[in-house]
Amino acid sequence: MNQSRWPQWLPLREDLQELVPYGAPQLPSLAQLNTNENPYPPSRELVQAIAKRVEEVAGSLNRYPDREAIDLRSALANFLNELSGLHLSAKQIWAANGSNEVIQSLFLAFGGRGALGFTPSYSMHPLIARVTGTSWINGERREDFTIDAIAASAQILSTRASLIFVTTPNNPTGTAISLTDLEIMAKAAGSVGGLLVVDEAYAEFSQEHSALDLLEKYPHLVVIRTMSKAFAFAGARVGYLAGDEEVVNAMQIVRLPYHLSALTQAVALVALEHRKELLSAVETLIASRQWVSRQLESLGVKVVPSSANFLLFTVPSSQEIWQSLLDQGVLVRDVGLSGYLRVTIGNEAENERFISALRNSLGGK
Ligand SMILES: *Cc1c(COP(=O)(O)O)cnc(C)c1O
C-alpha cells in the first residue's frame, strides 16, 4: 500500500488522498500563453463603467445579493437569444462563479450513476467528479482526437453514465464536433436516462453550430459557456449554463445560498452591456491562430487542427521544450500528453516571441 503524503491525524477523505490541486503555473513571464485567456484587457471606458457600477453596489453591501441572480440570468438569456435566435428566459439559465462551479453543481445534482468523458479533454471534469464523489469513466477518441459518435454512443449505452461530457471545441486539442454527431450522442444519452453536457467554453472561436440549436429538441442536453475565454473577463469569474428549466431547478438544490456576490452580478451585467467590445478581438484571435499555425508548420512542427484560441503541437520532449520556452520568458502548457504542448494565442508581440523562442528551443536540440 502507498504511504499517504498527508499527516496521520488529518481525517482527509480516503478517495481524495492521492489527488493534487489544479495547478496551471502562475509564473511571471513575458508571454503568458498557458491558460487560454483573451490577451486584450478591457478599454479605459469599460474600466470606468465597471468602477462606477461597483461604487453603486458598494452602498448596499451590508445586504445579501439577489440569491437567484435574476437580472444577470435574464441578461445572459438575452445574450444567447441574440446569438442563436432562440427564446430562452432566465428560468433556462444558471450562472455561477466560473463554469467550473456550474460543472461542480452538475456533478452534485446528477452524478449518481457516474460520469463519462472522452479523453484527452478538460482535466477539471474528472477532477471535479472525484472531489464530488462521482465515479469517472474515460471514454475514447480517435487517434486524431476527433470523436467517433457511433463508438461514443456505444460507450454511453454500455456505461449508462448519468452525466456525459463533450467539450467542443475540445480542450486541449481544439477539435470540434459537428451538430449531427452531437445529436447522435444526445439520443444515446436520452436512451439511458443521462444528461449530455456540452462544454462550449471556446464556441465563439469555432465555425461549427452551437449545441444551443439542440436545446428545444433534447431537454436532457445542457450547454455550458463562460465569460473567461473569448469574452475576455476571466478575472470576474462568471460561467453559465443553458438548459431545460427542470435542470436549472435541480441546480438550485445543490448551489450554496447567495453563491454569486453582488459585485460579480453587477460587474457581469456591465460586461454584457459592453459585449461588442469584449468580443471584438475574436476575429483577430482567429486570424492570429492561423498565423501561428503556419509558423509552427514552417518549423516542421505538427499542429492539431483547432477551432479554439489555442493550438496543440508536437515537440521532441514536452518537458524539455516547456522549460526551454519558459527560460526565454514564454509560458505555455504541458497538458500531460507526451510529445505535445499547448499554446494559447496571444497578442501579436506574444505570438512572435513564442515562435522565435520555439525556433531557438528546437534548433538547440
Ligand atoms: C477554461 C475552461 C472552462 C472554465 O472556465 P471558468 O473560468 O471556470 O468559466 C470550462 N471548460 C473548459 C473546457 C475550459 O477550457
Image (tube, rainbow, N blue to C red):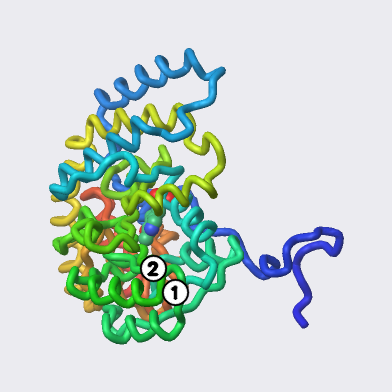
Q: Residue furthest right?
A: 9
Q: Which mark is residue 165?
A: 2
Q: From mark 2 to mark 1, how far is it between C-alphas? A: 6 Å
User: Along the horizontal axis of the image, is 160 left or right of 184?
Assistant: right
- Examine the image and state in which quarter residue 119 appears: bottom left
Q: Residue at x 44, y 27 (%)?
A: 263
Q: Residue at x 27, y 78 (%)?
A: 146
Dot 1 lies on which element? strand
What's the amino acid at mark 2?
Answer: Phe
Q: Nearer the viewer, residue 48 or 290?
A: 48
Q: Residue at x 17, y 73 (%)?
A: 180
Q: Residues within 10 Å of mark 1 (few under 14, many from 20)?
A: many
Looking at mark 1, is its residue's CB closer than 8 Å to ligand 1? no
Location of the C terminus by quadrant is bottom left
The reply to whether dot 2 and dot 1 touch (C-beta < 8 Å) is yes
Is 333 located above or below residue 313 in the figure? above
Dot 2 lies on which element? strand
